[in-house]
Image (cartoon, grey):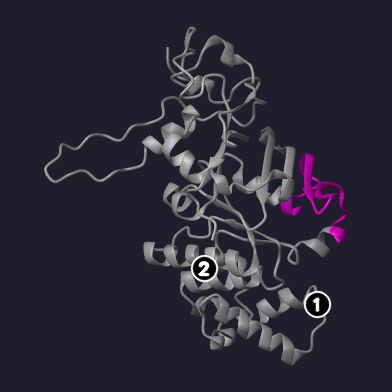
Amino acid sequence: MISPFDPENAPDPAAAVLRAEDLHCDFLTAEGIVYAVNGINLSIGRAEIHGLVGESGCGKSISARAIMGLLDRKRSRVKGGVLFDGKNLLGLSERELREIRGKRISMVFQDPLNSLSPLETVGKQIAEAISNHYDLPKEELGRRTAELLERVGLHPGAAKQYPFELSGGMQQRVMIAQGISCEPELLIADEPTTALDVTIQAQVLDLLKNLREELSLSVLLITHNFAVVAETCDRVSVMYAGHIVETAAAGEFIRNAAHPYSKALIDCIPRGRGKGAAREPLPVIRGFPARQYERPGGCPFAPRCPRAENACGGLPPLRDMGGGHLVLCRRPIGSGPPSGGALPARGEA
């Protein structure tokens, strides 16, 4: 089993099941162009669980939808490369994408109740996901559906139920069963534990880890929960304002986050205090998030960064901290104090 805390188990980039290269995604809206994703590079190794972390609106889900080819081509502009099995998915037709989507790359969405049809039983919906790619007799589809439900920890009888008859955790398991129905090589899970209680969250995450072992499944796990990252992921990438600002093995990241934004996020996690200890306010990140209607001309975090220098007005180079730990920062934590004048935070004098 791959340990999420062992940097030596970081996947070989040459063995990546999928690689996004200089991926951009812009949207045309009534208020102007939204620069949602600004040149990210991301590789997902075989049988790896790779966490993609960041605050709401940073571009995580848009990146996943761009990879899956689910964005409206008339209103969005996607550039760069998404390499899978030697092909650039961005250059494929919709028909060619349908041959891959659901069969070799699947996605589990954030809200299962809105993703599942309320008018059909869950068994029929799982069977439909299979029949989109395989021509199987009705009896075989029923057997396969029952096996999938058992694999995700549900009774085969759940196939006759409708989504509204199931709990949130059961609905999420149905979505995962649908996602793995054709035994894909990559599963993209977009906030799969949102709105679930802690016990059910743990069960869903354990299920993903078990499926990784059973199927050699690669998982891109989109989340904002660092506890999920620490317990589940092998590697983690942090997004801010459409950029990936840090990538590292999960254990190394939790212990030694090098980007000031990553460190600030970890510092904001509530921690238990001893009995009778004085309560202190949680730290906050000063300033405001970058406006997505402006194409970033420099480091997007510089206006909020306590380590920013005047030189941070330009986009920083990607810096290798060793062991596959990459940081998009001129003055990462651990490289010494800032040497120049600091930039003011947005909204501050």
Taking the image as shown, residue 94 lies to the left or right of residue 6, namely: right
Give me the disc on residue 206: none
- Which element carries disc 1, helix, strand or loop? loop
- Where is residue 113, by image quadrant? bottom right
User: Which quadrant is the N terminus positioned in?
Assistant: bottom right
Q: What residue appears at the point 54 percent right and 84 percent down from the top-left corner?
A: 158
Percent from the top left, x then y, of residue 206? 48, 65
In the image, which disc is placed on residue 207?
2
Q: Give the x, y percent position of residue 269.
A: 36, 41
| x and y, in percent, of residue 13 in the image | 70, 44
Residue with the most extreme front position: 8
Q: Nearer the viewer, residue 187 or 47?
A: 47
Instruction: Give the label, 1 or 2, closer to the camera.
Output: 2
Residue 80: say if magenta: yes
The kind of residue on which mark 1 rests is Tyr
Observer able to see residue 239: no
Residue bounds of the magenta highlight: 67-96
Q: Which mark is residue 134?
A: 1
Q: Quadrant of the C terminus?
A: top left
Name the N-terminal-most of marks 1 and 2: 1
The one of 332 and 349 positioned closer to us in this rendering? 332
Of residue 34 and residue 250, the one placed in the foreground of this image is: 250
Question: Would you say residue 217 is visible in this rendering?
Answer: yes
